[in-house]
Image: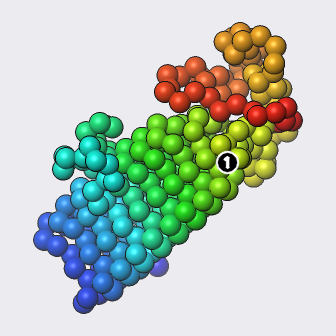
Amino acid sequence: MNSGVNQIHPTAIVEDGAVVGEGVVVGPYSIVGPEVELRSGVALVAHVVIDGRTIVGENTRIFPFASIGLPPQDLKYQGEQSRLEIGSNNVIREHVTVNPGTQGGGMVTRIGDNCLLMAGAHVAHDCIIGNNVIMVNCATLGGHVEIGDWAIMGGLSAAHQFTRIGRHAMVGGMSGVESDIIPYGRVTGNRARLQGLNIVGLKRRQFSRDQVHAMRRAYRLLFAHEGTMAERIEDVSQMFKSNEFVMEIVEFIRAKSSRGICQPALDHAA
């Protein structure tokens, strides 16, 4: 149990102006900048650097050599007072880098709650990450990427700037994501292509058999060869208009995007 007493190691530097909540641990050789807020229960294990206008939510644990809130790796960045907001109960492992937003992207990078960013993962400027997201070792997000709740980025995978990754999607290891991935989708490949639905993930999240079967039927219709995508979307929206999960996929496809929707390379069963 956290005693509520802060533990600041003598070798750590917490600069004047930083806001430190109750029960915070700042381990050896860590540096906390003057505009950082560490909320209650945050733990910086050792050698962690946090700077910029950064908020770290309750009970988040950050491991050695992570670099959090330092200026974006974007040549257009001109020192604007952008922000980084990290939610509660996250685990951020060794050598992770997370950058704040920029003027061109809404001025904020945001990570939700209960996420796991494994060693070497990178979250670039203006990314928006939901809750319960996992980024496996060395997974990389370009700027302006959006990831929905419960999505998983496999090891050594990378997402192109401005791509969207829907809820419960699974990106296979070493995959390059250059198009939007539908909610519940599963993609793999050097240039990622849809392989069907993330059935394993859906079972783990306790989706019912009927819910999964309905999504599989809708998937097959959406990515069939007959007709245009617009026609297939209209057909599916009429057939499954009372199914919230299918309609989530439909609305995701309909939403404005600069990247297009990731398609199957060949015929794949959902």
Q: Residue at x 49, y 27 (%)?
A: 258
- Residue placed most toward the observer, 27 or 161: 161
Identify which residue is drawn at 79% across, 50% down.
Answer: 200
Q: Is residue 30 left or right of residue 33?
A: right
Q: Position of residue 63 (x, y in %)?
A: 45, 75
**Residue 138 coordinates in the image, percent (x, y):** 55, 63
SS class, disc 1: loop
62 above or below 152? below
Q: Indicate left or right for 86 with 254 as reference.
A: left
Q: Is residue 159 visible?
A: yes
Image side of residue 148 versus residue 6, left or right: right
Residue marked by disc 1: 190
* The C terminus sits in image quarter: top right
Res 42 quadrant in image? bottom left
Q: Nearer the viewer, residue 231 or 75?
A: 75
Q: Is residue 11 left or right of residue 58?
A: left
Q: From where the camera sits, is residue 168 visible?
A: no
